[in-house]
Image (cartoon, rainbow, N blue to C red):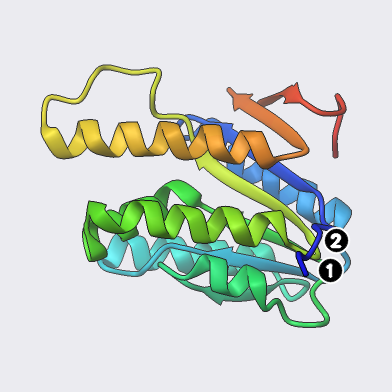
Amino acid sequence: MKTKRTGRITLVMGGARSGKSSYAGRLAEHRFRKPLYLATAEALDPEMADRIKRHRKARGPKWDCIEEPLNIAGVLAKLPPKTDGVLLDCVTLWLCNVLMKEGDKSFEVRRSELLHALENVRRDVVIVSNEIGMGVVPDNKLGRKFRDYAGWLNQDLARVADNVVFVIAGIPMTLKGKKGTR
């Protein structure tokens, strides 16, 4: 028996420092009473450790947090019962983790697992992703491969999403779904 998705998916995209994560956080704060922050970042250096610490403090006690650099599909498939919505930040960093830790041969498997989990998710999910295809073509093979995979993944996520919002200079623009989606 195939499970049907009962949660709504919102994809929030933008470039670096576009305001996409802030917008997605406000959206989740407004929508969810008991949100889960699904973090893909790892504290691999002091600067990233400091960023993570600041993000945790800014979220406050309302939020639960699961830090998972690779198996985000598994987390989405088995959400804690009290969670009424998820903020996944960020799928582009997750892609980087997959490529660096498991190699590009894992991309298709991990992508399929994620899309399957999203197609069957029982809670609303807000996904943050970087739009990296609007810049210069990378000068190395790994950079070009990452850009290609991120572009394909963003297309897949936009296809399954109910709403797609592009954020630039802190201004959200609805590309798919209801305008003014909060």
Quarter location, residue 86: bottom right
Q: Residue 51, position in %: x, y? A: 43, 60
Q: Residue 142, position in %: x, y? A: 16, 40
Q: From this viewpoint, is residue 90 visible?
A: yes
Q: Quadrant of the N terminus?
A: bottom right
Check disc 2 and give the amino acid type. Phe
> Could you tell me which secondary element the residue under label 2 belongs to?
loop
**113 or 53, nearer to the observer:** 113
> Does 89 sit left or right of 79 as displayed?
left
Marks 1 and 2 close (CB-CB < 8 Å)? yes
Q: How crowded is mark 2: few (under 14 residues within 10 Å), some or many (20 or more)?
A: some
Tell me the distance, in whole angstroms, between the alpha carbons under discs 1 and 2: 6 Å
Q: Please report the residue visible at 38 percent of the width from the left and 51 percent of the height from the top.
A: 108
Q: Residues within 10 Å of mark 1 (few under 14, many from 20)?
A: some
Q: Quadrant of the C terminus?
A: top right
**112 or 146, nearer to the observer:** 112
Q: From this viewpoint, is residue 19 visible?
A: no
**112 or 46, nearer to the observer:** 112
> Does 103 sit left or right of 153 as displayed?
left
Check disc 1 and give the amino acid type. Asp
The residue pinned by badge 1 equals: 84
Camera-side mark, 1 or 2: 1
In the rendered view, tell whether residue 86 sits above or below residue 150.
below
In the rendered view, tell whether residue 16 sits above or below residue 40.
above
Quarter location, residue 109: bottom left
Quarter location, residue 6: bottom right
> Could you tell me which secondary element the residue under label 1 belongs to?
loop
Residue 32 is tagged as 2
* N-terminal-most mark, 1 or 2: 2
Residue 131 is tagged as none
Q: Please report the residue visible at 86 percent of the width from the left and 52 percent of the height from the top.
A: 30
